[in-house]
Image: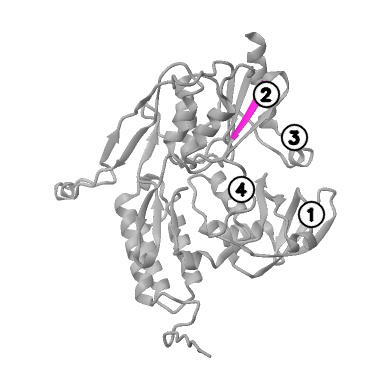
C-alpha cells in the first residue's frame, strides 16, 4: 500500500497559504494600481495613503487567508466604486460560500425572495417573502451595517446597501447560520442553514439571460438579466424576429449588472430607426512631469474618448412603438450604458430608481500569487459631458417599492410602465 504524506510548511497552518511578505506585497501592488489607474478619486472620502499604512500593519501578523481576504475587501470598498473588487485564486474562492437563498432589500429590510431546493432547504422551509430579522442572534440591520457593509463596494448608498443585503449570509463554506424569520403572516420562527454554494459554483438561482412575458393589449415585458453573454443579442433577435404583434414594449434592467456595452448598444439598435451616440469616456492621463511645474498629475489630467455613433441594424426590423425602460440601484455596468444611450434616442422614458453609478466595464489587473483586482478606469458621461459615474442615471418617472407592495404581490414600477406604454399604444 502506497502511503502519501503531505508536509505543511512549519509555522503555517493549512488555512494560511500566504506569508506575511506575500500579504504585504498584495496590499502594496493593489494600492499602487488603484493610485495610478482608478478614475473615481474625486468621490473618495477615505485617506488612501493612511489606508495603505493601516493595511500593511494588519497584513503582517500570521492570519488565515480568509481573514486577509476580508481585510483586502475592506480596503477596496474605500474606493466607493461598484466595479472595484479583489478576486482571490480559485482555491480560496472555493472556501467562501453562502446558502442557496435569494435575498433582496425592500425599504432597507432583507427578504427571502426565493431558494433552491435541496435536502437542507426542504427541512428548513425558508418561506418565500419571509423577512430576516436576525442572524446568529444579531439584529439584521446591525449584522449588515457592522459585518457586511464595510466590505461592500458601490458608488451610491442605495447600491451599496442592496449589494450588502444580497451577500449578507456569505462566509466560510460549511459553516452554519441561525436565522430568525418573520413569515408573511406575521409568525416568527428560526431556521438553520449552511453556507454551501461557493463563489466558484454556479449560482442555482441565476435567472435566464433573457425572459419575455406578454401582458394584455399587446404589451410585452422583456427582462434582460445579463449583458455578459455573447448570445444575448441573438436571443433578443430570436425572441423578436419582428415586432408585428407588439403594441408596447417594457425593457426591464432592474437586476442587470456587468456585461459588455457593445451588447447593450446592439440590442438598443433594434429599438430605434435613427443613429444614436454612445457614452463619452474619460480616463486618467498620467503625466508625472506636471509635478515639476507644481501642478497636479493624473488627478486632474484626463484623456477623453468621444462618443461613438451606433446606427440601426438593417438586417432586422426595428420596433417603433411606445417603450419604457425600468431601472433600479441594481442596474449597473453595461445596463447603465444602455440607459444613457436610450435617453439619447429620445424614444421613451426611464422608470424606477436611479441606477448604480458604476457604468461600463472594469479594468482587470493581475496581482501577485494569482489574485486579481478590478476597478473603474474610466468615467462615463453623456455626450454633452454630464458625468453619471458615481451618481447614476435618474429616471424621468420615479417609483419605489414598499414592503406592503412586496407582500401583496404588487410591482409599482412595472405598473407605472404598463400605464405609460399602454397610453402610447392607444394614441397610435
Q: For the residue carrying disc 3, how many other residues have a C-alpha within 10 Å: few (<14), some (14-19), or many (20+)?
A: some
How far is mark 4 from mark 2, CA to CA? 26 Å
Q: Earlier in the sequence, mark 4 or mark 1?
A: 1
Checking the image for residue 84, the label placed there is none
Q: Earlier in the sequence, mark 1 or mark 3?
A: 1
| Of marks 4 and 2, the one in the foreground | 4
Q: For the residue carrying disc 2, how many other residues have a C-alpha within 10 Å: few (<14), some (14-19), or many (20+)?
A: many
| Of marks 1 and 2, the one in the foreground | 2
Q: Which residue is mark 1?
A: 182
Q: Which residue is mark 3?
A: 410
How far is mark 1 from mark 2, CA to CA? 32 Å
Q: Which residue is mark 4?
A: 206
How far is mark 1 from mark 3, CA to CA? 20 Å
Question: In terms of secondary structure, where does tag 1 sit?
Answer: strand
| Of marks 4 and 1, the one in the foreground | 4
Q: Earlier in the sequence, mark 3 or mark 4?
A: 4
Q: Quadrant of residue 76?
A: bottom left
Checking the image for residue 418, the label placed there is 2
| Of marks 3 and 4, the one in the foreground | 4
The answer to whether mark 4 and mark 1 are in CB contact below 8 A is no
Q: What scheme was used to colour the molecule?
A: one colour
Residue 356, compared with residue 270, is above or below; it is below
Amino acid at each position: 500500500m502506497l502511503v502519501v504524506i503531505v508536509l505543511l510548511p512549519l509555522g503555517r497552518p493549512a488555512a494560511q497559504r500566504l506569508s506575511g511578505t506575500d500579504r504585504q506585497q498584495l496590499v502594496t501592488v493593489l494600492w499602487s494600481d488603484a493610485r495610478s489607474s482608478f478614475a473615481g478619486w474625486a468621490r473618495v472620502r477615505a485617506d488612501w495613503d493612511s489606508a495603505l499604512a493601516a493595511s500593511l500593519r494588519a497584513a503582517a501578523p500570521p492570519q488565515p487567508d480568509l481573514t486577509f481576504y476580508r481585510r483586502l475587501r475592506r480596503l477596496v470598498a474605500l474606493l466607493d466604486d461598484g466595479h472595484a473588487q479583489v478576486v482571490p485564486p480559485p482555491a480560496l474562492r472555493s472556501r467562501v460560500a453562502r446558502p442557496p437563498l435569494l435575498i433582496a432589500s425592500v425599504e432597507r429590510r432583507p427578504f427571502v425572495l426565493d431558494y433552491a431546493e435541496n435536502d437542507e432547504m426542504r427541512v428548513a422551509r425558508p418561506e418565500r417573502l419571509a423577512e430576516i430579522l436576525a442572524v446568529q442572534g444579531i439584529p439584521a440591520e446591525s449584522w449588515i451595517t457592522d459585518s457586511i457593509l464595510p466590505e461592500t463596494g458601490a458608488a451610491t448608498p442605495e447600491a451599496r446597501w442592496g449589494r450588502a443585503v444580497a451577500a449578507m449570509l456569505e462566509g466560510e463554506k460549511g459553516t452554519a447560520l441561525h436565522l430568525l424569520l418573520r413569515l408573511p403572516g406575521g409568525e416568527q420562527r428560526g431556521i438553520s442553514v449552511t453556507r454551501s454554494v461557493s463563489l466558484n459554483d454556479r449560482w442555482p438561482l441565476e435567472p435566464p439571460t433573457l425572459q419575455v412575458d406578454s401582458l394584455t393589449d399587446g404589451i410585452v415585458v422583456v427582462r434582460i438579466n445579463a449583458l455578459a453573454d455573447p448570445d444575448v443579442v441573438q436571443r433578443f433577435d430570436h425572441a423578436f424576429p419582428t415586432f408585428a404583434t407588439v403594441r408596447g414594449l417594457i425593457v426591464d434592467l432592474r437586476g442587470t449588472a456587468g456585461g459588455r456595452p457593445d451588447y447593450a448598444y446592439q440590442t438598443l439598435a433594434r429599438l430605434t430607426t435613427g443613429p444614436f451616440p454612445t457614452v463619452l469616456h474619460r480616463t486618467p492621463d498620467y503625466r508625472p512631469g506636471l509635478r515639476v511645474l507644481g501642478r497636479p498629475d493624473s488627478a486632474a489630467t484626463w484623456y477623453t474618448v468621444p462618443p461613438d455613433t451606433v446606427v440601426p441594424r438593417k438586417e432586422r426590423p426595428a420596433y417603433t412603438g411606445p417603450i419604457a425602460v425600468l431601472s433600479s440601484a441594481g442596474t449597473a455596468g453595461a445596463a447603465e450604458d444602455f440607459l444613457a444611450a436610450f435617453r439619447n434616442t429620445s424614444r421613451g422614458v426611464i422608470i424606477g430608481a436611479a441606477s448604480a453609478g458604476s457604468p461600463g466595464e472594469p479594468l482587470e489587473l493581475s496581482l501577485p500569487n494569482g489574485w486579481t483586482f478590478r476597478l473603474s478606469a474610466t468615467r462615463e458621461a453623456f455626450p454633452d459631458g454630464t458625468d453619471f459615474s458615481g451618481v447614476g442615471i435618474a429616471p424621468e418617472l420615479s417609483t419605489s417599492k414598499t414592503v406592503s407592495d412586496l407582500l401583496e404581490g404588487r410591482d409599482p414600477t412595472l405598473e407605472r410602465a404598463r400605464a405609460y406604454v399602454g397610453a402610447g399604444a392607444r394614441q397610435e
